[in-house]
Amino acid sequence: MDEYFIPMSEKLRRKYYPNGYFSAGQKTLRNSAIFVYVVFGIIAVLATLFVVMCIRAMWESGEGAISGLPIILLGLALLIFSIGMIVVFVKRCRMSMQQWIEKFAEKNGLTISDIHEFDKQVTLPNTLILHMAGKQKALFLNVGIGLLTNDYVTFGDDVMKRKDIVAAYLFDHIEIVETDCVSKICHIIHTVLISKHGVIDTEVKQEAGEHLIELLKQSNANMRTREEVLEEKEFQNLLRIEQKKLDVLEIIHNKKCGKLLFLRIFRIY
């Protein structure tokens, strides 16, 4: 399992998370932003030149504006898209660490103190770096990369409390890939983690997914799961059932909270 579950050694901590999870994320974003600025800046300049040249050619040839309008609109759309991408990355790069923490907390239904605790736990030596789909896909495709700490699990920008996970399943996702004019059926195993705040879905190797579920059960012995890999249709039906269970629990919880609030107000008066 060493290929899929890598302990957070001091060397890895210094390399990837010297100042914590969110500090590393900000650094990665800024490095990516340089590439985005250059690429989309060049595209914006080329799109501008293209639009100007089209307008000039139409003017000199005396052609009607309508005939060349689709081409001009295409150039303008490309220009607007490029500028939009640059603006988005500028805004993200200007976000402070506290703003990122607040964004993560809101997205994942957790408190800000939860996210701060997650950030602290990431750098602990018993944290595991997850390459659930294998090292090659992790390095070249950024697939199946996550972290497992004492109390949290994360893939991408999804973070869950381990104790909040109510169910975890493996299912077989089928994709049809075209190679050299030949259709090939690919079976890709996914692990899905379900909590009352959302769902995490990631590609895995079967043995890695099974081991992750075993580790998660240590935090919640009542977590629902299946020993076998489910067919995708069967899993989708099961997911709807799980969602209904969570909806019922949320309604019960809200009713209890409403009743408690009513009793508190009644006592005040």
Image: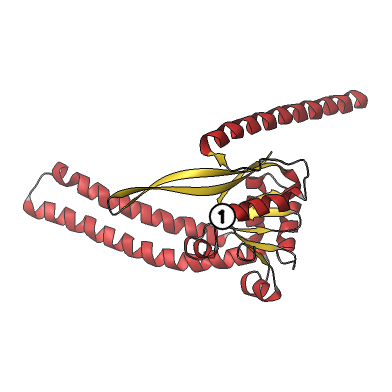
Give above or below for 118 relative to 110.
Answer: below
Residue pictured at 88% horizontal, 28% vertical: 264
Return the residue at label 1: 205
Quadrant in the picture for residue 11:
bottom right
Observer-nearest residue: 60 or 150? Answer: 150
Residue 240: image x %, image y %? 60, 31
Residue pictured at 50% horizontal, 65% vertical: 136
Give above or below for 228 relative to 207.
Answer: above
Q: Quadrant of the N terminus?
A: bottom right
Left of 83 or right of it: where is 121? right
**Callout count:** 1
Residue most toward the left?
A: 61
Residue 112 in view of the camera: no
Observer-nearest residue: 266 or 182? Answer: 182
Residue 32: image x %, image y %? 48, 65
Observer-nearest residue: 101 or 205? Answer: 205
Observer-nearest residue: 25 or 149? Answer: 149
Left of 269 or right of it: where is 242? left
Q: Looking at the picture, which amino acid does disc 1 mark?
A: Lys
